[in-house]
């Protein structure tokens, strides 16, 4: 069972690395927005390319950081209910939620997002704006890739929770050795 925790930690490191790199797009997004606002306001120069770049950077930021938020336990929970539950119950709720909601949702979005990206690539889809950005398929690919990262995060947390339950079953009621998130579980 210790192997489950090892695999979980490897997946979490991958998801965290992807999320940390994607988080830098927030800095680039702010710079593009600032430049766009200043150029429009003071120089009366508008650019649909800049506006589309803002959308694209926002998409990258959102899609690639979903998994990071999940492995860091940063997503919203109903605290009034959650804080009154025991560690085992929390693990079971997390496992059931991952298996019944998160994984199927991610797989459906990966499938249809992949089809959307493929159609866009085959058609050579570009922006509808005459001065917009080309290669629309490139940003559409963020949908299946981002959902794949979230799915990877879900697998990591699932393995961790299974390990935690196994640790409890072995009679270790404090869940020692079950990963850093047990106190937050």
Image (tube, helix red, strand yellow):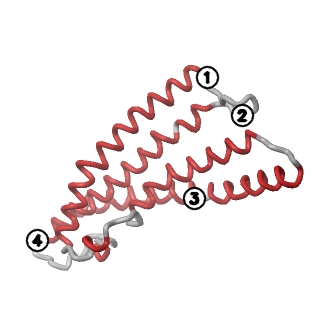
Q: Which residue is mark 1?
A: 124
| Disc sitting over residue 132 in the figure | 2
Q: Are marks 2 and 1 in contact (CB under 8 Å)?
A: no
Residue at the image position 11 percent from the left and 71 percent from the top:
170
- Residue that lies at the very extreme toward the top in this rendered image: 123
Q: Which residue occupies 40% across, 63% down?
A: 75
Q: Earlier in the sequence, mark 4 or mark 1?
A: 1
Instruction: Give the number of the mark in front: 4 or 1.
Output: 1
User: Disc 2 and disc 3: Cα gap in Å?
Assistant: 24 Å
Compare marks 2 and 4 and give the one earlier in the sequence: 2
Tell me the mark number nearer the camera, choosing from 3 and 4.
3
Q: Which mark is residue 170?
A: 4
> Picture coordinates of residue 181 (x, y %)?
32, 71
Secondary element at tag 4:
loop
- Give the CA distance from mark 3 to mark 1: 29 Å
Q: Residues within 10 Å of mark 2 (few under 14, many from 20)?
A: some
What residue is shown at x 31% (from left), y 72% (from top)?
Answer: 79
- Residue at coordinates 31% horizontally, 49% vertically from top-left? 102
Q: Earlier in the sequence, mark 3 or mark 1?
A: 3
Q: Categorize mark 4 by other alpha carbons within 10 Å: few (<14), some (14-19), many (20+).
A: few
Report crowding for label 1: few under 14, some 14 to 19, many 20 or more residues within 10 A (C-alpha).
few
- Can you give x and y, in whole percent of width and height, for residue 107 in the image? 34, 39
Q: Secondary structure at mark 2?
A: loop
Query: Mark 3 packing: few (<14 Cα in 10 Å), some, or many (20+)?
Result: some
Residue 97 screen position, x and y as percent = 25, 55
Give the image location of residue 133, x and y in percent. Answer: 69, 34
Q: Which residue is mark 3?
A: 23
User: Secondary structure under badge 3?
Assistant: helix
């Amino acid at each position: 069972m210790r192997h489950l925790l090892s695999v979980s930690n490897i997946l979490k490191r991958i998801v965290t690395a992807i999320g940390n790199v994607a988080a830098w797009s927030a800095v680039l997004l702010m710079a593009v927005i600032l430049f766009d606002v200043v150029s429009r306001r003071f120089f009366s120069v508008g650019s649909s390319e800049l506006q589309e770049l803002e959308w694209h950077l926002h998409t990258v930021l959102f899609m690639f950081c979903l998994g990071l938020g999940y492995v860091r336990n940063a997503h919203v929970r109903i605290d009034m209910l959650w804080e009154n539950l025991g560690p085992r119950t929390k693990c079971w709720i997390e496992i059931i939620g991952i298996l019944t909601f998160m994984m199927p949702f991610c797989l459906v979005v990966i499938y249809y997002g992949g089809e959307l990206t493929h159609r866009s690539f085959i058609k050579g889809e570009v922006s509808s704006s005459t001065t917009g950005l080309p290669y629309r398929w490139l940003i559409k690919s963020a949908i299946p890739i981002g959902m794949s990262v979230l799915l990877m995060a879900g697998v990591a947390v699932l393995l961790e929770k299974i390990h935690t339950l196994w640790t409890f079953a072995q009679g270790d009621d404090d869940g020692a050795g079950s990963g850093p998130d047990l106190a937050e579980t």
